[in-house]
Amino acid sequence: MVALTPGFPVVRDNAVLQQSSRVNFSAAFLAQQRAAFGNNPADEFNRMTRYELGKIAHHDPLSAFGTVSETFTSKPDPTKIEFGQSSVTDSFGDGGKAATTHMVDIDGEEVKRGKSLAQDVTDLRSGVLTADDLPIHVFQYVDLDGDAHWVTQNNRALTVLRMAKFNPTKIHVLKKSDLEKKQGANSLLSVLNRFKAMPNCKPSPEMYIRIAGVNDIGQPRNSWDWDAPFGSVAK
């Protein structure tokens, strides 16, 4: 373990420590992150803020956020659609086809995992898949500063397209009322609470991808764990 006083939030026991607190980080975790991303302080601040705050289950009320639009005066620009959460796992979830899924144990429950994002990138580049095979569902979010963003609801699909250097070609626009009808992880409140793990609580043009490895305190993690290390970034 190595000790340092970081200039970004640090989460321990699901609480954010004061910035003056002295904390321990796993040397293996820091070495992996710097090998993957270099040692640029500005980049590290952004990345580690997203990593640490992404470990928390945020439950802020709707009043803590900007607004989601019900009507629109323009269409989303495919090149400017942003991401709406701090990171994604490196594989698809239980929506995968049976031939491309396998079973894993997550918190004592057997869950199907789909093929890797990297495989979809390869399939896009080879022509096995087209951008139409990865439709994007977007909503318009006006942040607390009054700036409007087109944000994807299905972050992994947009991540794959960005990794492959493709633009979305099939875009479904969601109104506020559409999100209000959804429940669980895709409900309006859940979608907005993902922003709490983002710098300045805003959508982002880049997405970090989690991989298997050790977390910030040296514990082994799988890529679907929220405190798994970041392995790459899609822009």
Image: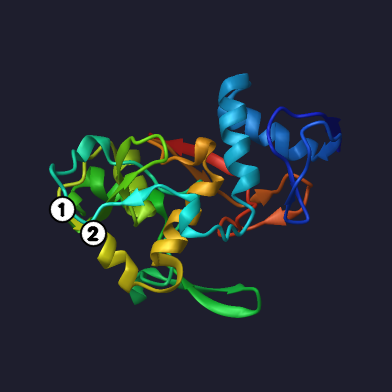
Above or below — where is 167 with respect to 173? above
Between 120 and 43, the residue placed more toward the observer is 43
Can residue 154 be seen in this snapshot?
yes
Marks 1 and 2 sit apart, C-alpha to C-alpha, by 13 Å
In the shown orientation, is residue 17 left or right of residue 128?
Answer: right
Where does residue 120 sit, x and y in percent of width and height?
32, 52
Q: Which mark is residue 170?
A: 1
Numbered disc total: 2
In the shown orientation, is residue 39 left or right of residue 95?
Answer: right
At x 67%, y 56%, the residue is 221
Determine whether label 1 and label 2 are within 8 Å by CB: no
Where does residue 147 sit, x and y in percent of width and height?
33, 35
Q: Which mark is residue 109?
A: none
In this figure, which residue is indicated by the disc labeled 2? 174
Tell me which amino acid carries mark 1: Lys
At x 23%, y 59%, the residue is 175
Where does residue 119 sit, x and y in percent of width and height?
36, 52
Between 146 and 17, the residue placed more toward the observer is 146
Q: What colouring does the structure picture have?
A: rainbow
Quadrant of the frame with the C terminus: top left
Above or below — where is 178 with respect to 131? below
Quadrant of the frame with the N terminus: top right
Where does residue 87 sit, x and y in percent of width and height?
50, 47
Q: Nearer the viewer, mark 1 or mark 2?
A: 2
In the shown orientation, is residue 127 left or right of residue 61?
Answer: left
At x 28%, y 41%, the residue is 81
Can residue 90 be seen in this snapshot?
no
Tell me which amino acid carries mark 2: Leu
